[in-house]
Image (cartoon, rainbow, N blue to C red):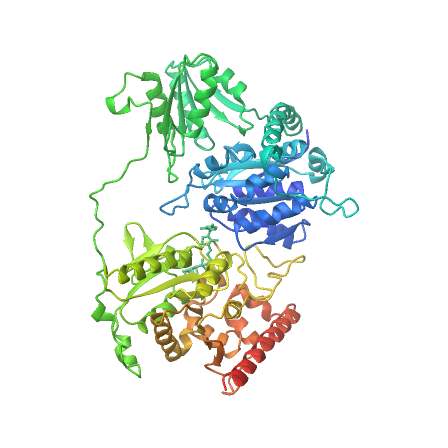
Amino acid sequence: MLEQQTIISSGNEAAAHAIIDIGFDGEGYYPITPSSEVGEHVNRAYAQGEIDLSFVVSTSELAAISTVAGMAIAGGRAVDVTSAQGLLLKAEELPAIAGLGLPVVLNLATRDVNAPLNIKNGHSDLAATLGWGWITLCAPTVQAVYDLNIIALKVAEAVNLPALVAYDGFHTSHANRRIKVFTDRQALREFVGPEPPRRLSLLDVKHPHTFGPYMNDDLINTKVQIDQKMEKALKLLPKIFDEYAQMSGRRYHFLEVHGEPDAQVALFILNSAAEASKVAVDRLRQEGRSVKLVSPTVLRPWPADAVLQTLFSADRILVAERVSQYGANNYLTNEVGAVLQRAGDHNLVLSRTYGIGGLNVYPEDAEYLLRLALNFPNVPDHEKRWKGYYQAWPGDRDYRPAAEIAPIATEEVTRNAGKDRIDLRELAEMPHRVEKHSACPGCGLFSNLEMFLRGIDGQVVLFFNTGCGMVVTTGFPSTSFRVPYFHNLFHNATSTATGVIEMYRRFRRQGKMDDEITFIVVTGDGGDDIGMDQVIGAALRNDPMIVLEYDNKGYMNTGGQLCYTGLLGQRFTNANVGPQQKGKLQHHKDIVEILRGTHASYLFQAGESNFRDLLMKARKAQKMVREGNFVFGRFFSPCPLNWGADPSMGFRIVDKAVKSCLFPLYEVEYGITKLNYNPEKAGQKIPVIDLFQSMGSAFAHLASEEFAPVAEEIQREVDRRWRRLVEMDTNLAL
Ligand SMILES: Cc1ncc(C[n+]2csc(CCOP(=O)(O)OP(=O)(O)O)c2C)c(N)n1
Ligand code: SF4
């Protein structure tokens, strides 16, 4: 056995620990709860110089897994992590990776797939993957997360298929447990072995090969090959489990069984719920009941023979699943049923959906399910169904949450119509369209948005991307919106708005409605990383909407991860500062300048520190959309929580961002650039370092002596961009 040490670890830390111990060549990263921390831990180790791996922060999950595919086809060992919608966004690439035979590892901290949006546990993401050709291992405990990552890579490389390690979001990803990890990384790496040489490599220029061609008709044979590789993995896994047991003292099997081996009743359940179920099995056995628990470690390859052997003797099997799939049955029930049918179909397979939306499973819940199977069919009528729900209900159709805020009347918010000048006092009295939100004190999001909305007359419909703006305003059954509002997942608001606007125009043409509406999309800067294509698409189509980006220089809702708007050297939870890494490696993204290339009608930057300018831009933006044009605006929006900044400094930080020229106030109207405020001319320009000193701990190091070269580099870049703007302003505006 190899030497090991005991540590306290969460499931996410255990996955990171395994990734670090194995020594992967590369990781693609995109944050999503509850899996985000894995990459953060790996990056921390990288920043400290503990490991040498290419850590690529991507602009979406699809981009991350595509980067991982690139690493693998170049011959590197690569790993990725995700959950729920993140997995679904990778879905295009995942079957391709299996078809290409790339042995990458993907950790999945399972989470229910909405709607409505939910971050808690469910297995609907995992269920979606089962036909995609990935070896799939299930880790019910924190220890198993560590162990199965190692086993996954070993089997993946042996058969040239990718492997997925699934563990439960929050129940396992965030549970702190005592686990054992190897102390000697080198010895572990010997167990994993060097990466087997690939027959073909994209980097082999002496023997060039074409990968990923298109192939039709009878040449499509990768599906058969995947099947054969799965069969090979099925034969190999017991040997790998054996070797791992010798090395670690921990033995895994296709299925973990707890209770009486030949029990009359079996509960078949996946991952974390299996732990609570063991207690229920023990209690019932003390009563002399013949019960057992069966929990699969391996879902793909599907261990049909082991399932048959384990369940054959049971009269009744209750398959409990954290999914609800309409159709013949939930997926595992179908698979268990199909296996047992081979043996003559003498067993009764019952199915229950449990725990969707992340509900906890206690021993009492498992006991209830076991008793249901034990007593079947002598159970209450409503439980006689062979499939159904436990811990889930359809909700009360007649439930109407109390209206805490009143809808807004058009007259209340019509203050600017037909006026040349705005009356600030009158606008100050305008009612809020968004109220009672729970943003952190000092957050720049709503101070900017609220001010902007005061410049907008009449009715608005709001669309929010996922992010803080959405999270702090809605949480069933409450809402902060006095106007219609729609959240349609992380980065889809712009395209969703396009669809709504198309119907709005159609219905107005058809005379079905006559309300005048301004459509406004609110997004974080992260929404414009992952959703950049959608914003560009709306701009290119000149869809009449206002898109407002609050730029808080990070993915704040998920815990302060890197956004491409971040500054060179900025500290993020996934771009740490240490001997080997100095925070973010690139200069800040300039979304307005990116959109300039779409020749959108009106683009602007504004900030709460210059509120008259902001209000004038709101008025102009509304005029533009009323004329049928696309508008994009961006605010500089402090995030005291993740910047570690003083919440009372927000207004002054925005002012400094403007005066340092890091965030110039300007607009681009039909291609003509106009600076709205020139700190140089006003004699108010300040060095960027003055700004960093007040921006909080994510930036404070940039003002230190050690980071002086980085600060100088940022100053040069800011000045270069500023000079360009000044040139465009003075020359083109004439
Ligand atoms: C497809 C997908 N990937 C990842 C996420 C997780 N996620 C939700 S919000 C968010 C960050 C949003 O950042 P930003 O747009 O800057 O808004 P902020 O959090 O700063 O308000 C992330 C990564 C998700 N919901 N869906
Ligand atoms: S985390 Fe930051 S962006 Fe989110 S509400 Fe708090 S201050 Fe605002």
Tell me, yes or no, if residue 6 can be seen here: no
In the rendered view, tell whether residue 482 sits above or below residue 412: above
Q: Quadrant location of ligand 2?
A: bottom left
In the image, residue 204 lies at what x, y percent? 76, 46
Q: Residue 359 sits in which quadrant?
A: top left
- Residue 638 in sight: yes
Q: Where is residue 5 drawn, in percent x and y?
A: 62, 37
How many callouts does the rendering have?
0
Q: Residue at 29% x, 61% y: name it.
A: 436
Q: Is residue 380 left or right of 98 when viewed as pictured? A: left
State which quadrant residue 213 falls in. top right
Q: Is 269 above or below relative to 547?
A: above
Position of residue 111 in the picture relative to residue 517 (left or right): right
In the depicted structure, whether residue 408 falls above or below residue 607: above
Give the quarter of the image for residue 413: bottom left
Q: Nearer the viewer, residue 113 or 658?
A: 113
Q: Residue at x 48, y 19 (%)?
A: 339
Q: Does 45 appear above or below 334?
A: below
Quadrant for the N terminus in the image = top right
The x and y percentages for residue 22 are 66, 40
